[in-house]
Image: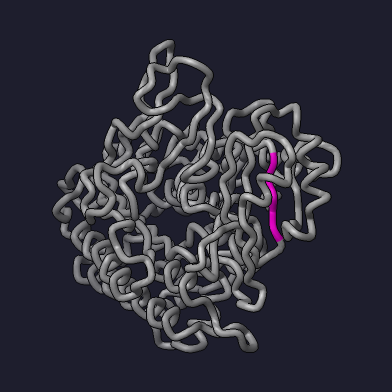
């Protein structure tokens, strides 16, 4: 769970590192999320493939084996953390599909009582069965009252703080981003202006258990990255480029799918299954293609490469896998529930927050059958939400009344298609692969202390010669840049 605490201002914490980066800033930063890849997977892969592209990148890089992504570890807050420098209590983004006490249903006129599902999945698309789905259909968007007016809430309007994309674009530079749904419009930031171009092929149109099809989908992302280095964009992009973007990046889906579908081997050390190794090899080759293109364009020495997963997947140990019907958790509260988001976590919004104590007492009585490890809530018998960096529902329309953390390996689902999932609070979900690489880093190092993917955001800005303190989330949470850039 989130345990970052700071008492010193950002400007004080980053003086040495900011000085060295601003003296000789990079021209470009490339950020790639290998969704699902754990910190432990890097060690496994380098041992298997000592001459791989990843191994080569690490020889001129800093590896952060203690890196943790957001809590919850859903893709949406995981992405937002890297580009805002802040956690859900500050960004307001807890999950891709979750309740918001302040919004209204699509097609409404903001009448009646507020409270509706903030859905930033493929459900927003015009047609999610198509690879290029038509983008976000405004008819699918919830509504919210802003300055007395009933307005549409696009995903980027969910954010309560700015993003690196907005700041970089406002500085006169160009930006580009690629991800799995048009809803990743969220990286544009609250202003909606953060992207020069976005490319969002719909992953939902791809057969979920077909690894070859998902790798072909990921290849579209790789092709986009390579086009950006020519200052061009693929067909079906939103926006355009007139120069190589100062910041570009996106994600790989195939490892996430292989983990969920096949899992790891149930032997000592939990080696990669054949499908997982196949897709890690694919990602490795893709990173190699990007590096080769950077070199051919004369951009490699001026580009900082950041590889950091939005999330892991749990359990790594297949023997721990188990399922509980999410309705069991809902019913176990014994009180009316407005909404529950479930994966290997349950985020519960009650009809009345005044019933929290009753719900917690009932959940405690159901710990064994519900496979409950921890309960976070502001009530007796639970761990206070704020004590673990979650904020409090009293002060925020985004914070759940109750967070249920199951024992590791348990997924709250009725699906029989997955053997791993993410979104939860375990180390398998949160301790993710994270490294930076540049030929300017002449002494490779592995940092083993706990760091957070929120620390990527100010590093991106500092690497481009921009004050990381321009990020509102960085100022609010006191987020430091990743270690290793002190001179």
* Magenta-drawn segment: 402-406
Residue at coordinates 37% horizontally, 28% vertically from top-left?
106
Q: Main secondary structure of the magenta part?
A: strand
Q: Name the quadrant containing residue 430.
A: bottom right
Left or right, residue 7 beside residue 234: right
Q: Residue furthest right?
A: 380
Residue at coordinates 42% horizontally, 68% vertically from top-left?
257
Left or right, residue 455 beside residue 217: right
Left or right, residue 184 beside residue 326: left
Left or right, residue 18 beside residue 390: left
Q: Residue furthest top?
A: 148
The reply to whether residue 28 is visible in this rendering is: no
Q: Is residue 307 placed above or below 69 in the rendered structure?
A: below
Of residues 14 and 426, the one nearer the viewer is: 426
- Say whether residue 171 is magenta: no
| Residue 272: image location, x then y, percent | 51, 83
| Residue 389: image location, x then y, percent | 68, 42
Of residues 483 and 92, the one nearer the viewer is: 92
Q: Name the quadrant containing residue 385.
A: top right
Of residues 257 and 277, the one nearer the viewer is: 257
| Residue 419: image location, x then y, percent | 54, 71
Residue at coordinates 76% horizontally, 42% vertically from top-left?
387
| Residue 307: image location, x then y, percent | 44, 64
Q: Is residue 54 placed above or below 91 in the rendered structure?
A: below
The reply to whether residue 82 is visible in this rendering is: yes
């Amino acid at each position: 769970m989130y345990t970052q605490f700071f008492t010193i201002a950002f400007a004080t914490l980053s003086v040495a590192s900011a000085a060295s980066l601003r003296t000789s800033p990079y021209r470009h930063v490339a950020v790639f999320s290998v969704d699902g890849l754990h910190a432990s997977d890097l060690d496994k892969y380098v041992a298997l493939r000592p001459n791989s592209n990843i191994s080569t990148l690490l020889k001129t890089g800093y590896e952060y084996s203690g890196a943790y992504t957001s809590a919850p570890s859903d893709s949406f807050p995981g992405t937002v953390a890297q580009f805002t420098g802040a956690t859900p209590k500050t960004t307001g983004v807890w999950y891709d599909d979750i309740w918001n006490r302040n919004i209204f249903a699509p097609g409404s006129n903001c009448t009646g009582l507020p409270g509706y599902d903030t859905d930033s999945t493929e459900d927003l698309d015009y047609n999610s069965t198509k690879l290029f789905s038509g983008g976000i259909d405004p008819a699918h968007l919830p509504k919210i009252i802003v300055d007395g007016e009933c307005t549409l809430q696009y995903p980027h309007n969910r954010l309560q703080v700015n993003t690196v994309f907005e700041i970089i674009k406002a500085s006169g530079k160009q930006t580009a981003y690629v991800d799995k749904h048009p809803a990743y419009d969220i990286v544009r930031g609250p202003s909606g202006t953060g992207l020069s171009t976005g490319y969002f092929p719909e992953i939902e149109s791809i057969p979920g258990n077909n690894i070859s099809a998902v790798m072909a989908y990921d290849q579209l992302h790789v092709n986009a990255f390579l086009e950006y280095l020519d200052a061009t964009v693929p067909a079906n992009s939103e926006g355009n480029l007139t120069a190589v973007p100062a910041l570009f990046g996106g994600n790989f889906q195939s490892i996430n799918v292989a983990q969920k579908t096949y899992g790891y081997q149930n032997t000592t050390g939990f080696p990669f299954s054949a499908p997982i190794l196949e897709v890690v090899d694919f990602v490795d080759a893709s990173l190699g293609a990007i590096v080769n293109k950077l070199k051919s364009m004369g951009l490699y020495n001026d580009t900082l490469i950041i590889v950091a997963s939005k999330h892991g997947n749990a359990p790594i140990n297949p023997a721990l896998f188990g399922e509980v019907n999410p309705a069991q958790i809902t019913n176990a509260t014994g009180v009316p529930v407005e909404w529950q988001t479930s994966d290997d976590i349950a985020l519960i919004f009650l009809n009345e927050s005044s019933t929290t104590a009753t719900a917690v007492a009932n959940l405690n009585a159901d710990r064994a059958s519900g496979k409950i490890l921890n309960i976070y809530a502001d009530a007796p018998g639970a761990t206070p939400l704020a004590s673990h960096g979650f904020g409090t529902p009293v002060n925020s329309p985004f914070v759940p009344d109750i967070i249920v953390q199951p024992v590791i390996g348990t997924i709250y689902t009725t699906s029989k298609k997955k053997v791993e999932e993410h979104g939860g609070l375990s180390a398998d979900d949160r301790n993710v692969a994270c490294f930076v690489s540049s030929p300017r880093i002449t002494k490779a190092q592995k940092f083993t202390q706990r760091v957070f993917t929120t620390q990527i955001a100010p590093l991106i800005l500092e690497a481009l010669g921009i004050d990381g303190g321009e990020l509102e989330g960085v100022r609010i949470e006191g987020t430091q840049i990743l270690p290793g850039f002190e001179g």
